[in-house]
């Protein structure tokens, strides 16, 4: 017969002082673990949400990111008239030749400067990225030194508010609007007119081409055609594939989460073990009594395991609660691919919280196994005699 | 029995608990030291004396924006400038690697000698490099890492420039703060790219550290209101600019470190309380025997302090030896080249552990101080 869970629950409550520190300790470990994973999740979400499966991104062969890519105007003209490229109602090819430049701008908190990615786009380019939505002000006018920045970037850099100016060497770019890119990589960008960008930054070449092929088959054909054309020396990839490769940046955070989780949990397991051993020791007579009453060794082992898991699960739940306020908090660091600051959010999702609680339960089970084993093996008579 | 053996025996009489406490303190200390080292690695670039003599001038727009090569003539004439060379980051991938695991720069070899202040040529000949247009000067760390020697070919795929490089090692240097870099002829890059007439940055040497500020303002002024405005700063300031690009990573590591410390406190405090609670009766007997409160406090303090310090010793020592003997540079593909656990970091860890030992003894001491001898003797477990 198994011991009622009520017994463990009451024990936890009665010995609250001893269990409190275990609970808190586990809560802290779990919150760090969950937050690091939430960060990795945010980075992944930003890459996953970027790109349209119908679009193809063309960059220079050998370049790792758009910022290091060069596409000549001849190549642009050649690609423009490829049959595979879709056309809009005005019979214009849906292709956007874009320029990506890096502009250094002062941070809003006065802690120096950081790089911002400025993308020179065309009207086609805006149409090709439906996740980008203007939320305040207006779009830039072609031929004007006007720029529309992401809402999240505006919160991090000085002068990015509507009406503010971004200094790019001699040129002053006026911020005329804010956009929201739904957590995608475009949330780390500022957009302006492509030709104006080329003029200001003295770029003869484009950085990339964003193309909408006629259909999935045309897409495959177009990619093959570009890859095979030795004169072009370009690389074509589905836009989604390109951005999912940029997910690379989440890996170090995931590794860090793993290492931190492991190392901190070792400490937490030891602490839990300590508490559980003390709990078993102080309950020796009680356990003896339970055995006399007819509860089997396995019932006692099981009961103590449940208790350990219960305490840990409470800790885990508290840890998750502690992590929740960080959900949606945006933070940023340098992206080594584009060399510009990338902004992302902590994403504390329900699956992550479940993962955190399971992690806590694992700590609890590990920490209580040896003490529980000891409790179940106590010799009945000696246990009853003990003080 | 002396007091010391009394304390030692008391600490170890519940061997399992002592072991668990010491291990959890050790693991946490090791973690703390690792985090502090990581933070230092990311935020404090290695310092060198010569860095104050060197100035980097980049395009004011951003580091990624090139500068016109014709600026050289103007910079050379600026008083206080001893030497100046173009300094262009190539960003190539070595052999078949998929990341740029060490930096390559295009420079003017004849002038670069003046800038390589602390570097010593340990193999090959500098003059040979100046003569050989496809030659390169490589840092000793890179040479060692890939098992290269003088005369070996090094192939690079350009990720930033639309060209590949095939270089031959002419000389090897050592003694700079970062012995990983590779330097090659800027002329070679110009040829490969069809002479863009641009450079990445300018690298300047000034006569003295005092002259640096003057030179910086003169360089900045020389190109003010031109089509390519320049931001000149000391090499140190330039490096710190890189550090600031890490953004919130620093806060992230700091907050994790503080959570680790807090967890550490929780663990130790709860263990010490447990250890003392078990011994209430004994401590009451000690009191009855005429031991002063002060002495009993010192027993508790010594035990708690001792356990914490033992744990710290094992943890910090372990972290030090682990990070010293592991080759993190190749594991992280050049991302964390040094990861040096400095004495300062170890001292920080040890101080925190020592404070921890003291803090952990406070609550039990108060409990024991409050207890009356009679109540204490009545305690059952």
Image (cartoon, rainbow, N blue to C red):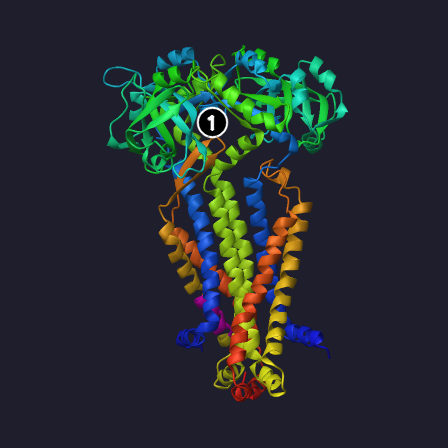
Eyeballing the image, is A108 above or below B89? below
Quick one: quadrant of the C terminus of chain B?
bottom right
Residue at horizontal 64%, vertical 34%?
B48
Quick one: quadrant of the N terminus of chain B?
bottom right
Q: Which residue is mark 1?
A: A65
Total number of numbered discs in the rendering: 1
Nearer to the camera, B261 or A8: B261
Chain letter of the residue beneath label 1 in the structure image: A
Residue A304 in the image, given as x and y percentages of width and height:
49, 72
Q: Which image quadrant for residue B368?
A: bottom right
Residue B303 in the image, given as x and y percentages of width and height:
63, 71
Residue at horizontal 62%, vertical 40%?
B331
Residue B7 falls left or right of residue B376: right
Residue A163 falls left or right of residue B253: left
Eyeballing the image, is A316 above or below A145? below
Residue B76 in the image, given as x and y percentages of width and height:
59, 14
Q: Is residue A361 visible?
A: no
- In the image, the segment drawn in magenta is A301-311
Residue at horizontal 71%, vertical 75%?
B5
Eyeballing the image, is B74 above or below A53? above
Residue B130 in the image, given as x and y percentages of width and height:
70, 15
Residue projecting furthest to the left: A89
Please identify the dominant SS of the magenta region.
Answer: helix
Mark 1: which secondary structure?
A: loop
Residue A306 on the magenta segment: yes
Q: Residues within 10 Å of mark 1 (few under 14, many from 20)?
A: many
Residue A90 on the magenta segment: no
Q: Is residue B328 visible?
A: yes
Residue at horizontal 49%, vertical 19%?
B66
């Amino acid at each position: 017969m198994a011991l009622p869970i009520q017994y463990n629950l009451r024990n936890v409550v009665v010995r609250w002082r001893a269990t409190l520190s275990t609970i808190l300790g586990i809560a802290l470990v779990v919150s760090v673990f969950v937050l690091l994973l939430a960060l990795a999740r945010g980075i992944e979400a930003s890459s996953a949400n970027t790109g349209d499966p119908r679009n193809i991104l063309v960059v220079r062969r050998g370049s790792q990111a758009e910022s290091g890519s060069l596409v000549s105007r001849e190549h642009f003209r050649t690609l423009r008239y490829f049959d595979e490229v879709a056309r809009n109602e005005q019979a214009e090819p849906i292709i956007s030749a874009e320029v990506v430049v890096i502009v250094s701008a002062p941070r809003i908190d006065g802690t120096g400067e950081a790089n911002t990615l400025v993308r020179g786009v065309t009207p086609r380019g805006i149409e090709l990225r439906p996740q980008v939505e203007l939320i305040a002000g207006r779009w830039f006018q072609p031929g004007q030194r006007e720029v529309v920045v992401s809402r999240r970037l505006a919160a991090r850099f000085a002068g990015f508010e509507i009406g503010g100016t971004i200094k790019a060497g001699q040129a002053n770019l006026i911020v005329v609007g804010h956009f929201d890119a739904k957590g995608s990589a475009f949330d780390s960008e500022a957009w302006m007119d492509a030709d104006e960008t080329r003029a200001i930054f003295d770029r003869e070449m484009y950085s990339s081409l964003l193309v909408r092929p006629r259909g999935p088959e045309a897409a495959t054909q177009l990619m093959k055609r570009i890859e095979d054309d030795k004169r072009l020396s370009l690389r074509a990839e589905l836009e989604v594939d390109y951005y999912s490769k940029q997910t690379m940046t989440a890996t170090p955070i995931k590794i860090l989460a793993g290492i931190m989780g492991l190392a901190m949990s070792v400490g937490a397991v030891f602490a839990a073990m300590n508490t559980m051993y003390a709990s078993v020791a102080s309950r020796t007579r009680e356990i003896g009594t339970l055995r006399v009453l007819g509860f089997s060794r396995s019932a006692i082992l099981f009961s103590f395991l449940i208790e350990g898991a219960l305490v840990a699960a409470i800790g885990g739940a508290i840890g998750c609660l502690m992590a929740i306020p960080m959900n949606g908090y945006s933070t940023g660091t340098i992206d080594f691919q584009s060399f510009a600051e990338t902004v992302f959010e902590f994403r504390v999702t329900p699956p992550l919280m479940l993962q955190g609680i399971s992690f806590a339960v694992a700590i609890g089970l590990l920490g209580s196994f040896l003490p529980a084993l000891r409790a179940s093996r106590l010799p009945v008579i000696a246990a009853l005699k003990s003080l | 029995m002396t007091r010391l053996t009394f304390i030692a025996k008391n600490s170890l009489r519940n061997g399992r608990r002592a072991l668990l406490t010491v291990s959890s303190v050790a693991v946490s200390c090791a973690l703390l030291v690792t985090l502090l080292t990581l933070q230092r690695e990311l935020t404090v670039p290695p310092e060198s004396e010569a860095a104050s003599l060197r100035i980097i001038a980049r395009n004011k727009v951003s580091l990624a924006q090139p500068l016109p090569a014709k600026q050289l003539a103007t910079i050379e004439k600026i008083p206080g400038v001893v030497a100046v060379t173009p300094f262009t980051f190539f960003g190539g991938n070595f052999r078949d690697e998929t990341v740029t695991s060490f930096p390559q720069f295009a420079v003017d070899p004849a002038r670069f000698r003046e800038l390589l202040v602390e570097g010593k040529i340990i193999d090959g000949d500098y003059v040979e490099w100046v003569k050989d247009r496809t030659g390169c000067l490589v840092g000793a760390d890179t040479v060692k890492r890939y098992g290269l020697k003088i005369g070996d070919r090094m192939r690079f795929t350009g990720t930033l420039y639309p060209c590949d490089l095939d270089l031959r090692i002419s000389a090897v240097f050592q003694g700079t703060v970062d012995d990983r870099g590779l330097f090659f002829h800027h002329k070679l890059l110009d040829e490969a790219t069809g002479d863009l007439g641009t450079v990445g940055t300018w690298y300047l040497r000034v006569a003295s550290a005092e002259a640096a500020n003057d030179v910086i303002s003169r360089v900045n002024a020389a190109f003010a209101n031109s089509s390519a405005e320049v931001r000149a700063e000391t090499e140190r300031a330039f490096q710190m600019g890189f550090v600031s690009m890490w953004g919130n990573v620093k806060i992230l590591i700091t907050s994790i470190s503080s959570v680790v410390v807090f967890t550490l406190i929780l663990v130790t405090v709860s263990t010490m309380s447990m250890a003392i609670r078990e011994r209430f009766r004994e401590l009451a007997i000690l009191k009855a025997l005429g031991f002063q409160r002060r002495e009993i406090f010192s027993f508790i303090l010594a035990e708690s302090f001792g356990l914490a310090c033992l744990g710290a010793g094992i943890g910090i020592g372990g972290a030090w030896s682990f990070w010293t003997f592991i080759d993190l540079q190749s594991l992280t593909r050049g991302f964390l080249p040094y990861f040096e656990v400095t004495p300062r970091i170890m001292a920080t860890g040890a101080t925190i552990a020592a404070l921890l030992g003291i803090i952990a003894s406070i609550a039990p001491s108060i409990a024991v101080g409050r207890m009356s001898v009679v109540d204490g003797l009545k305690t059952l477990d």
